[in-house]
Image (tube, rainbow, N blue to C red):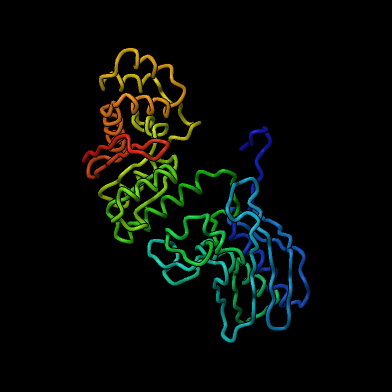
Amino acid sequence: MSGTDGKPLRTGYTTGSCATAAAKAALTALILQEPQQEVTIRLPIGEEATFRLVRCEFDEARAEAEVIKDAGDDPDATHGARIIAEVSWAGEPGIVLDGGIGVGRVTKPGLPVPVGEAAINPVPRKMIRESVQAVLNEFDIERGIRVIVSVPDGEEIAKKTLNGRLGIIGGISILGTRGIVVPFSTAAYKASVAQAIRVAVKCGCGHLVLSTGGRSENFGMETYPELPEEAFVEMGDFVGFSLLQCRRQGVKKVTLVGMMGKFSKVAQGVMMVHSKSAPVDFGFLAQVAEEAGAAPMEVEEIRRANTAAQVGDMMQERGNALFFQKLCEACCRAGLRETGDGMEIETILISMKGAMLGRAGLQG
């Protein structure tokens, strides 16, 4: 993948990889009683990666190593975070792994980590355990150890993530299934959407409100104040993916909330609504306007419009509520084509200023 200047985007490393590197370095320092400057680990994708340590301290009972997370060219909230692992000798055999300051605790079901445990996902847990066990084996040591992963600024960083909504309290999650961060990865966002839907279902939500962004989510919350926080999921551009996830999880009703630009595409059956995935079809919008009784001059004006928002403003100013009603119904039909029967889909269309333009619902 390339950036806007044509140069390849730089791959980074997950919090799970950073925590593994810090844990391995800390244990090595504890055993050798020597400071470590860098450490090499094996990633889940089968490659090796070397991390430079910014700090390594130890005494006879414990050691601590610190890595700065480098997310590459991905706009990751945890880029630059301090990932620290403290390793100490334990009285009992085995490896005890836990989270310290800035690593969240799981408080809701539906996540890959049980309620009450530190938000260190299964793959990072496996990476850390296998890495420190390999060091113990290398030095023929059978003593038990305790590994504590901390992120000093984790609680503040978590405010920029979905953790609070997912029921992860007190910090960030230690994540990563491949060990690397792929820049601008749609897979990572999709995974977070799927996880949010699973949490909502586990919390008993039968009605989910899927929004394309922050403003549309706020509107959804104002529209359905009786729904719990978990019921609101920011799906971004992944309309079709999110609807299918809801279908697979047995959700009975979905409300889609969004604006003209993205939902004019959904109305045509485009289920991935990123600006680069499909342009706004002004011919389609003109046709809807014509069916809604717009004058020929208005229809022609829509064909020559620059943005879908401009079309929405025009129809709102002319008081053509039927235009928005038809668009919302078309979005519902497109959604039901994607999911099949058995689900109710509602669409709420709002303006850039947060005013409702139209609303419709259909039962599959």
Q: Position of residue 230 (x, y in %)?
A: 36, 57
In the image, what residue occupies the spot 34% across and 43% down? Answer: 243
Q: Is residue 73 left or right of residue 99?
A: right
Figure quadrant of residue 40: bottom right
Q: Position of residue 326 (x, y in %)?
A: 27, 29
Q: Can you say which quadrant of the picture contains the C terminus? A: top left
Q: Position of residue 320 (x, y in %)?
A: 28, 26
Front one among 334 and 16: 334
In the image, what residue occupies the spot 60% across and 83% down? Answer: 90
In the image, what residue occupies the spot 42% across and 27% down? Answer: 308
Q: Is residue 358 above or below residue 125?
A: above
Q: How many numbered circles does the render carry? A: 0
Q: Can you say which quadrant of the picture contains the N terminus? A: top right
Front one among 314 and 91: 314
Front one among 327 and 362: 327
Q: Position of residue 87 (x, y in %)?
A: 64, 75
In the image, what residue occupies the spot 26% across and 47% down? Answer: 253
Q: Is residue 67 above or below residue 28?
A: above
Q: Is residue 246 left or right of residue 29?
A: left
